[in-house]
Image (cartoon, rainbow, N blue to C red):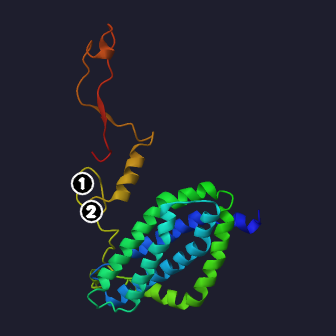
Amino acid sequence: MNPIHQLSPAITTMIRMDHTHVMSTFHKFHAGTSAMVKRGIVNTACIALEVHAQLEEEIFYPALREAGVQDSVLDKSGPEHDRMKHVIARLRGMEPGDPAYDSSFMELMQVVLHHVADEETVLLPTAEKVLADRLRPLGAAMTRRRLELLAPRSGELTVNMARSLPAAGTPCCSPARRSRGPTSPGAPSARARPGPERPGLPSQHGGFDRRHARSWERRMLQPSRVCTLRPVRPAVRGTGRLGRREGHKPFPFCRLMSPHA
């Protein structure tokens, strides 16, 4: 096998990646988005679908037919592509403000979803069986043809992808964060501010400081520190599981007391 073919992904993997890309583009579309963002999303999806359909018609479907695959899903893939191209042509002649713009894009989404479901569940598993030794060479051929198709449309694709980003023109900081004034030199930072009161743990702020509390607990658990023991009740001879033998005195219940107690 050609070393280049070994590095290329299988053609079925590339088709699934195209499906994922188109579906993620569909999910960006919302009725309340701005006209510019809608136009960018629709154009990006249309270019991806046109290139994907041409690659399948030129490389994938002929390879299946050469392998002797006869399936109704394969037979209706061409008409589904024709319907998809018809809706794309209608969308290209409309503006985002047209009343039928959103419904036309929903129609395109419906056609694509049905087509993707048929390919993912029928054609791709069949191709992985009958084209097992040709999946990578076909993937390399699809990659070369994709570059040829996208080269003259690279500028258009870049502009539409930039338009389809909803957060492209939004500021990086929230209004609440921008409204905060400069911090005075003597004021403690947000990380150094004391938390809620927690009795029993010392803190330089008079409250609870997590870092100080953790270091205090580590110091108290050192062997040299675990020495302050105070019985909470006297031992009773002959009681408990350890005190049933005659003459055995159980160890008194104790608790660890901090030096600050």
**Measured from the top left, where is residue 133 in percent x and y?**
69, 58
Labelled pair 1, 2 in contact (Cβ < 8 Å) = yes
| Amino acid found under the numbered disc labelled 2 | Gly
Q: Residue at x 40, y 67 (%)?
A: 114
Q: Residue at x 24, y 17 (%)?
A: 236
Crowding at dot 1, Cα within 10 Å, few <14 / some 14-19 / many 20+, comes out as few
Give the residue furthest to the top: 246
**Measured from the top left, where is residue 33 in percent x and y?**
30, 83
Pointer 2 residue: 195
**Residue 183 can be seen, yes or no:** no
| Amino acid found under the numbered disc labelled 1 | Arg
Q: Residue at x 54, y 68 (%)?
A: 15
Q: Nearer the viewer, residue 160 or 226?
A: 160
Pointer 1 residue: 198
Give the residue furthest to the right: 2
Which quarter of the picture shows residue 185?
bottom left
Q: Secondary structure at mark 2?
A: loop
- Work out whether 137 lies above or below 33: above
- Work out whether 28 lies above or below 116: below
**Measured from the top left, where is residue 30 in percent x and y?**
31, 78
Crowding at dot 2, Cα within 10 Å, few <14 / some 14-19 / many 20+, comes out as few
Q: Quadrant of the C terminus?
A: top left
